[in-house]
Amino acid sequence: MRDGLWRGAAALLLWGALAPAAAADAPPALAQLEQAVAADPDSPRPASDYRMAAIRAGEYDRAIEFFERLVAAHPKSANAWLNYGYAYVDKIPAAGAITRVILANQSLEKFTKSIELQRAWLALYTRGNSYLYWPPIFGKGPLAVADLEEAIALVKREPQRRPVHARVYVALGDAYWRTEQPEKARAVWREGAAHFPGTPQLQARLARDGDELSAYLYNQLSPNERVDTSLAPLWAEP
Amino acid sequence: MGAAWGRSFVALAGLGACLSFAVAGEEATAPAASWFEEVAVAAGITSRHTNRAFENPYAEIMSGYTALGAAVAVGDFDGDGWEDLFVTDSAAGAPNHLYRNLTGESGRLAFADVARAAGVAEGNDARNATTDALWLDYDGDGRQDLFVARCGRSLLFHNEGRGRFREVTREAGLDAHANALAALAFDADRDGRLDLLVGSYFQPVDLFQPQTPRFFPESFESAQNGGGVTFYRNLGPDQAGRVRFAEETAAAGLAQSGWTLDLGHGDADGDGDEDLYVACDFGTDRLFVNDSRPGAPRFRDVTAAALGIDTKKGMNAEWGDYDGDGRPDVYVTNITDDYMREGNFLWHNDGPAPDGGGPRFTDVSRETGTHDTGWGWGGKFLDYDNDGRLDLFVVNGWVSAGTESYVPLIFEMILRGGVDLADVRNWPPMGERSLSGYQRDRLFHNQGGVFRDEAPRHGLDSQRDGRGVAVADLDRDGRQDVFVANADAAPHLYRNRLPTGARWVAFQLEGRRSNRDAVGARLTLTAGGRRLVRWLDGGNGFAGQSSRRVHFGLGAAERAEALEVQWPSGERQRFAGFAAGRLYRIVEGEPELQALPAAQESRR
């Protein structure tokens, strides 16, 4: 979840470069955005906009606490729980190695709650993709495969194919690779590439093999890089 | 972020300069065969380190967190011109070892353990475990004394001459209980005397019979219940002529309670005094700049401005100018494994901040290829191929035991939440599991600002759990040898047999106004059109003290054109035009270099 629209060093650096200026007027902006989220907790856009602003301001804990209150007020909102989980993910690059694990675990709990409320492709993709960041020794690879297979099945039932769906193909292939199913990995990446030609993440994977591919994926799934959790691609033009 | 970008650019610009650096000795030093030979047992190094086994209610848990104490220190204790080795053990009742260098007589590396005869073998008993060692001439009598760091009460041995030592800990004012893991001797206030800095891991509880179970780190990333550091100022001789130390940690601005693993000093800001890097576990590494006046040691914490980030697991603090820009950089090991991708630090010294705000460093470990060594411990700069560029040797691995991993157990505790981490009883026993075990040591060859691991080629890729590293030209053949102290295992002694003609020159300094060991001296050598800068340190790097002789690889240059020595006293001396391939003695204030007998001459 590091390359492309949702991830990438360029985005990280952009956020970093903007952070000092944004921090100066962060409180009023964040307060307004919090009002917008609270007024429409089931809508992904206000929640995403708010988290992006919180990242720019470095107000990770504030965002977590806000979503904690939000889900308390709206315990049936799958979107609120999903963004609550993202708020933990957003803090990971700013934390030490051990705290990262704790944050990642917290985010999984919130994603799971969202899925319990609504088995949406986005939530399943998010949780499945999160599992991929865990070291293999934790045995989360099969969980990732299960979530992402379900996510891709749901994506295929979507009325309109959208570029954002390519990520599910990327992640499911990564999950197959992680669980030592290289042929299935290649098959799903190829399928994704057929549906979404020119997707750089898929091309990068299909252009590599063996150790080179393993090293590439290892670096792609580094907790040291910021995962771009903006949901903007959901409402972007196809 | 803008400032950070600026610093990165400076660092990368430095790399670019390195890449265009002329490599005078490249052809002469390029054969593909191994250049190192493991000779420990053949040379008489027959001891094996054993971790301390505790006998208390928490012993099973403690054993997973105390695989430490394997250390080595290089020093010529008998003044015969051949550098000797002090090698530690940690098991109850096990002796420490003083390996006298007999190479001069044999022509091959050869050592004999004379620790008992010298009176320095005793270091491990029911209440004390040896963890580190340091040679220093604390009283300036020209003989190397010995500090033995311990969990318990550390020891200071005065070198009485004739191969004998006398324990003087109490009379020197150093008798204190601490769980020391690191020691550093340097002249903090430039008064001409070596001060002593001791780093402790656990707080000063009795680890052997703890009165409380709450002595483990209270946090993985911000623990403040560690042992911190203790600064002892050297007061010089009293009326009876006995040198005493005074504990002045707080007055020196060094009071802290981190989990100290290593200490390193260097002149970060180029102002001629010694700054400090304190590597800490479970918390933030610290960089202190020196604001001392003679008789008034004082340091200032500049960590946030100078470093900015930390991975909370610093294990090594080695200083050296890897990129030839004349400023000392710092190499810090961290944990890099599948479950924790911290990455080591190679802190490039960017020079002082433009606003006068002190030194600035940028981590260039990824750009240079030195970030991932596994769970790193001791790391030392050296120039093993005598090409004039500093290479880097790093040892790695925590506990190599059974095939099962300890990782899931520790993370189960972490993720459980609400655990009182300070209480040792809450930590899972490691048992026969491994944690970052069987990791290979790395020999990073400096190829002009970027490094390539050459350990497999040279047979230095041991999987033992390495701790301390010492670099010294033990057979005085102009090639730097490497000693590795491994935890719960036999050590390695790697003899460097670099086959062809890269030149070298080395210097043995003796202070007069400065401290006798000349710790803190800066040497700037010009040879073959290059300008190389080295510093003489007082024990940098985890659990390993390298030679005090300052070694320069010269590549193809047959002569050194000039040498400038900046002594800790501030005095500068310049020497012009001398031949390569010799070890020279330099005495502060004396105008001539003195060429010491070459190894072959010495053997006759």
Image (cartoon, rainbow, N blue to C red):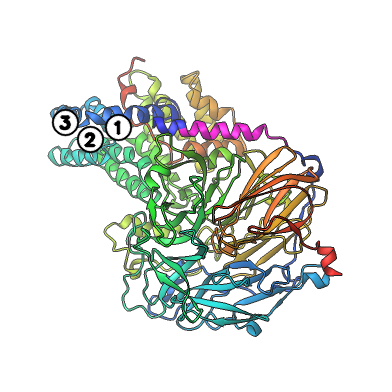
Query: Dot 1, how many residues are within 10 Å of its Cα: few (below 14), some (14-19), or many (20+)?
Result: some
Q: Provide the residue designation for mark 2.
A: A78
Mark 1 to mark 3 CA distance (whole Å): 29 Å
Label 1 close to label 2 by CB (< 8 Å): yes
- Residue A125, position as x, y percentages in the image: 37, 34
Can you tell which of label 3 and label 2 is closer to the viewer? 3
Asked if residue A129 shows in the view, the reply is yes
- Most common secondary structure along the magenta stretch: helix
Chain on which label 3 sits: A
Q: Residues within 10 Å of mark 3 (few under 14, many from 20)?
A: few
Nearer the observer, A163 or B81: B81
Please, what secondary structure does the residue beneath circle 2 have?
helix
Q: Which mark is residue A31?
A: 3
Looking at the picture, how far across and down is residue B449, in whole percent? 62, 38
The image quarter in which residue B542 lies: bottom right
- What kind of residue is marked 2? Ala
Query: Which of the labelled discs sits on residue A120, or is there none?
Result: 1
Q: Amino acid at mark 3?
A: Ala
- The amino acid at mark 1 is Ala
- Say which of marks 1 and 2 sits in front: 2
| Left or right: B162, with B433 as reference point | right
B132 in the magenta segment: no
Q: Quadrant of the C terminus of chain B?
A: bottom right
Name the chain letter of the residue that bears numbered label 1: A
Q: Chain of mark 2?
A: A
Q: Is residue A195 above or below residue A217?
A: above
Where disc 3 sits, the SS reads helix
C-alpha gap between disc 1 and disc 2: 9 Å
B314 lies left or right of B106 = left
Q: CA distance from mark 3 to mark 2?
A: 22 Å
